[in-house]
Image (cartoon, helix red, strand yellow):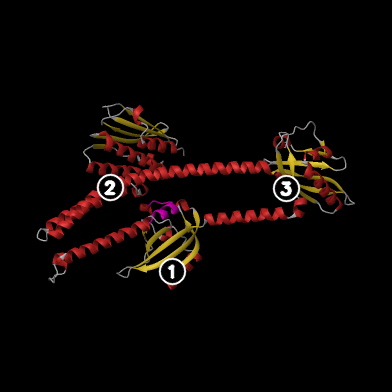
Amino acid sequence: MNSLNMKKKPDARKKNSTASISNEELTISGNLLQRAFDNSLVANIISIVDNDRIIRANRSACKLLGYSKKQLLMMKRADIFKVSESGYKNMLKQRKDKGGARADLFIMRKNDLLWPCEITSVLFKDKDEVGYSITSFVDRRERMSAQRKIDVENKRVTQSLSDDLLSENNDWIMSIAKSSYDVIWDWDILTDLISFGKNYEKIFGYELTGSTISFAKWVNLVIPKERREMKRRLRKIFKSRKNVWNDTFQFLCPDGSISQVISRANIIRDDQGKAIRMIGVIHDLSKMHKLEGQLQQEARRSEMEMVEAVEVAKEMERSDIGRELHDNVNQLLGASMLYLDMARADIKNGDIYLKHSAEYILTAIEAIRKLSKGLITDTIDDFGLSEAVKVVVRDTMESNLAKIHFRGIDDTLQDSMNNKFKLNMFRILQEQMRNIIKHAEASVIDISIVKKGPQIILSIADNGVGFDCGKKLAGIGMTNIISRAKRFNGNASFISKPGQGCRLLVSFPFPEG
């Protein structure tokens, strides 16, 4: 500490150290910006203004446009925009005048599919004054779909509130008959007979002995305290000129339960305005409310199960990352700090200690890089599953003594898989490789992904210590593999005996078409 207070000529080594740290900070900042760009949820591309060639594209852009990153980096803006359209030309003019522009345009996805998007494009230059543009895409399909739903709902509400339309629209009555808890009824007021739709018995529990029942008999099923008031309201509306009747009452069911009922009907009158007939619907609110409650409970239960499953997966991933950081990276950084302290205390031998500290830091950076590879799957998106597996094989052999054999995947087979399926299979392979390296003590590992008949088969075999399948299958790693296989209607099985290695076989149905 005293050395900090002594006036000495600046040490050249410290200047170099400061410079190297600044460069490293710049590198880290650049890497962070690149990762932020690549992982942004907004689709972005960067292109050169002079020739419109695309030089950067993030994952969201690849997903929205339907191309791999490798394909996009071989394209120009004319490949995804209709550059001859006036809207596109106006956007370019506005961007040139103001440095940025926004417009609603159609983009051309893979296979020339047109897609409505909100486009934002901004100009910038590098230190050499080369002009670039960064263009963002926001998918407008969901917004348009939401607006269509709002328009449909507004139309439905308007129709429901219109008494005139309700009284004249026979289609309304027919559509009500399709509802689970609605009963069509037709009351001939002159004969006092009511006929009900077929689902009357199903909803209210009363068996109809004939096609009709008298209103006087039926109204007795309305609970007494509401029956008199209901008859009064009917007499009042018959004396009026109204053509629509709405009422709510409680209805006694044969099992002793009480249903909350709402009834709507059209009133048909003769030439003198006398009510002669009512045609309408009775709706059982109680059963609907009960069903809604059950559906809400089921939705909450399903939501909780999904949340729990996600949390378990997250906790397992956090646990794996935390264990790796604690057991490996933390130790490396701790050793680096120790050498830094020794360098401060022993200036004479400081260079040696700083060299050792730098070596540990580089090892820690490499460990973090490998850990990040387990989380990021750019290789699958850009170059395919076969290349991603080769990367895992190469990295595993660099840090372990095991010899790993993998012959790659046939291009036709690989093209038949979508990216979600590839990622799922890749995660299964990663999980099993971790199991083998951690527990098997294997010297040889064989990996193959092939098509056999109507199935895709993933096989991972090792010559390690093996295990008793009956005792081991409860392990979390194996459970994860079985669960991942089931997501795509697959089946995972482990074949192993103590001392005889292990073979994992995962079979998936071959995708049709």
**Rendered residue at 11%/61% (across/down):** 347
Type of the residue with mark 3: Trp
- Towards the viewer: 293 or 28: 293
Image quadrant for the N terminus?
Answer: bottom left
Kindly give the residue lying farthest to the bottom in the view shown: 97
The disc label shown at residue 326, or none = 2
Q: Residue 379, how many percent across, how many down?
A: 33, 48
From the viewer's perspective, tell me whether residue 269 is left or right of residue 158: right
Number of labels in the image equals: 3
Position of residue 312 relative to residue 154, above or below, is above
Q: Residue 162, how many percent across, how many down?
A: 73, 55
The image quarter containing residue 433 is top left
Mark before the other along the chain sequence, 3 or 2: 3
Q: Is residue 94 magenta?
A: no
Q: Residue 198, how many percent across, how many down?
A: 73, 36
Kindly give the residue lying farthest to the left in the view shown: 348
Neighbor class of circle 3 (other Cα within 10 Å; few <14, some 14-19, many 20+) is some
Q: Which residue is mark 3?
A: 172
Neighbor class of circle 2 (other Cα within 10 Å; few <14, some 14-19, many 20+) is few
**Rendered residue at 88%/42% (across/down):** 190
Q: Secondary structure at mark 3?
A: helix
First to last magenta residue range: 57-68
**Rendered residue at 80%/32% (across/down):** 210
From the viewer's perspective, tell me whether residue 205 is left or right of residue 388: right
Q: How far apart are labels 3 and 2 at the CA level?
A: 68 Å
The disc label shown at residue 100, or none = 1
Type of the residue with mark 1: Gly
**Rendered residue at 42%/62% (across/down):** 135
Q: Residue 259, how many percent across, how many down?
A: 71, 41
The image quarter containing residue 145 is bottom right
Mark before the other along the chain sequence, 1 or 2: 1
Give the number of the mark in front: 1 or 2: 2
